[in-house]
Amino acid sequence: MIILKKIFYVLINKYFLTTVAFVAWMVFFDSNNLLTRNKLQAKLDSLYQAKQYYLQEIRKDSALSHGLMNDSAQLEKFARERYLMKKDNEDLFLIVDTTEDPHQ
């Protein structure tokens, strides 16, 4: 019984109640509450992943651009594959596969 009275006095203590109210306010009602912070952290993580992806793509495209500027054979291969360019005395046949791939 004495233990219950001690617990009761601690629970109705104004400092304890103020601390509990402050923590509840900060966790649930404040503009920087935990839910908002979790959402912002998730968005920050996704933006960081996007940044890493774009930096990797920039490195890849820079290497491709450097290769195209310095090697005429690679430039010709790139133009033929990507833009279907051809020489004047050539015929170009484009084969399009319309069957679906069963592995996708």
Image (cartoon, helix red, strand yellow):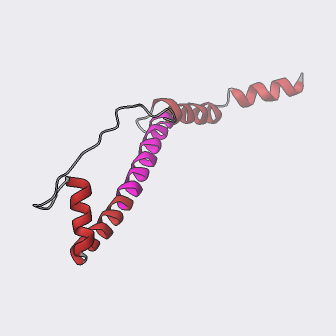
Q: Residue at x 54, y 35 (%)?
A: 22
In the picture as drawn, the residue positioned furthest to the right comes out as 1
Q: 66 or 96: which is nearer to us?
A: 96
User: Who's the residue at 43% across and 46% down the image?
Assistant: 46
The residue lying at 30 percent from left, 63 percent from top is 61
Q: Quadrant of residue 94?
A: top left
**Residue in front for this viewpoint, 91 or 99:** 91
**Residue 36 lies in the magenta stretch:** yes
Q: Residue at x 40, y 54 (%)?
A: 53
Say above or below: 42 vs 25.
below
Residues drawn in magenta: 33-55
Task: Tell me the quarter of the image containing the N terminus.
Answer: top right
| Front residue of this view, candidates 94 and 50 | 94
Task: Report x, y in % for residue 15.
Answer: 62, 36
Q: Please give left or right for residue 42 compared with residue 11 in the image.
A: left
Image height check: is 55 above or below 71?
Answer: above
Q: Where residue 56 sits: x, y (%)?
A: 39, 61
- Is 64 colored magenta in this rendering? no
